[in-house]
Image: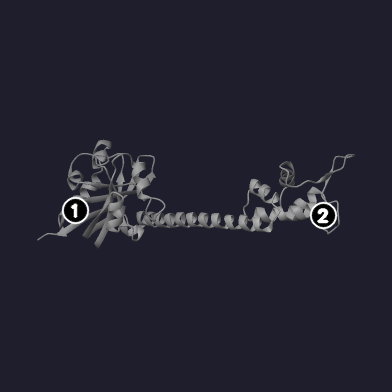
Amino acid sequence: MKFKLDNYKVGELAEFYGVSVETIRFYEKVGIVNPLRNEENNYRSYSKEEVISLDYIMKLREMDFSIDEIKGILKKDKLADLYDAIGEKEEKIKEEIQVLEEKLSTLRTYKEKINQCLHRTGKVEVIEDMSFVIKNIDSSLKKSLDALKNWTFLEMPAFTIMADPELLASDESLLDRKNRSEQCEYVVLAEDYGNCYNEEKCKERGAYCYRASKVVHTVISVHTNKEYKEFIDLYNSVKKKYNVLSTVFIKFLAMETTREDGIEFVEVWMPVEEKE
């Protein structure tokens, strides 16, 4: 756009700022720019003063100020008011960045879990010294999750229940709604969330910490149209070498759907002790 003293056309300004003609006309409609209108041909033209105002508005838009916020800024005369408005916007953006960073961390953690589904399904390992945070679901899952969100993490992991080992060994479906509701526990793998399993902090939020000295860990794939036999096979296999303790943790990670049936990928931790 060539510099001139007056009479800028809306198309020239739109091209210069890399926006649409409709954007600048919208600014006119909401009253933050006021071009002159030629009464003979009804064409709009912008004076040098209006171009300066438009440049100011474009800078504010680049800083993510809304149209309403810009209206408020334009009504204020003191530079200190603009300074305060920019400071408030800065703090808001910092908060948004923090939220996005937490979401990114959650995505990366879940991405790693999906990587386990792809590459570690069926592989069994023994882990020494693990901790779990456990909270009763005494009203609804949502209320329980909201209570746990007081910790440092943004989103909870995939739904996890604490199961009685004997349920795994029974012929009943582990994921039957009635059986699941009787378990009525929500479990967070403490190692996923740094120091969130501080025992005093757990007590304050109506939860408790379960520590296991030895855990059998694996990811298994379960066909949803069958009797979840994979759980029982795993349990019986582990029992050949270890005594399975009174708590088994099961986390549902993801689902893959085929034409025939669905396949759930499930992470399992079995606290165990060596057989004498």
Q: Is residue 66 left or right of residue 250?
A: right
The secondary structure type at the circle numbered 1 is helix
Give how far apart the Cα atoms at labels 1 and 2 are.
82 Å
Residue contact at pointers 1 and 2, CB within 8 angstroms:
no
Residue at 80% across / 54% down in the picture? 49
> In x, y percent, where is residue 66?
63, 48
Q: Which mark is residue 159?
A: none
| Vertical order, 223 against 84 (above or below) | above
Query: Residue lying farthest right?
Result: 40
The residue type indicated by label 1 comes to Ser
> In x, y percent, where is residue 195?
33, 60
Q: Is residue 93 left or right of residue 55?
A: left
Q: Is residue 39 left or right of residue 25?
A: right
The secondary structure type at the circle numbered 2 is helix
Q: Quadrant of residue 122?
A: bottom left
Q: Nearer the viewer, residue 234 or 188?
A: 188
Q: Which residue is mark 2?
A: 48
The residue type indicated by label 2 comes to Lys
Residue at 80% across / 46% down in the picture? 35
> In x, y percent, where is residue 48?
82, 54
Q: Nearer the viewer, residue 171 or 73?
A: 73
Residue at 46% across / 54% down in the picture? 103
Query: Residue lying farthest bottom?
Result: 128
Q: Which mark is residue 237?
A: 1
Kindly tell me whether residue 219 is visible in this rendering. Answer: no
Q: Nearer the viewer, mark 1 or mark 2?
A: 2
Q: Nearer the viewer, residue 103 or 53?
A: 53
Number of on-image labels: 2
Give the mark, 1 or 2, whose residue is nearer the N terminus. Answer: 2
Q: Is residue 132 left or right of residue 49?
A: left
> In x, y percent, where is residue 27?
72, 45
Query: Residue lying farthest top?
Result: 178
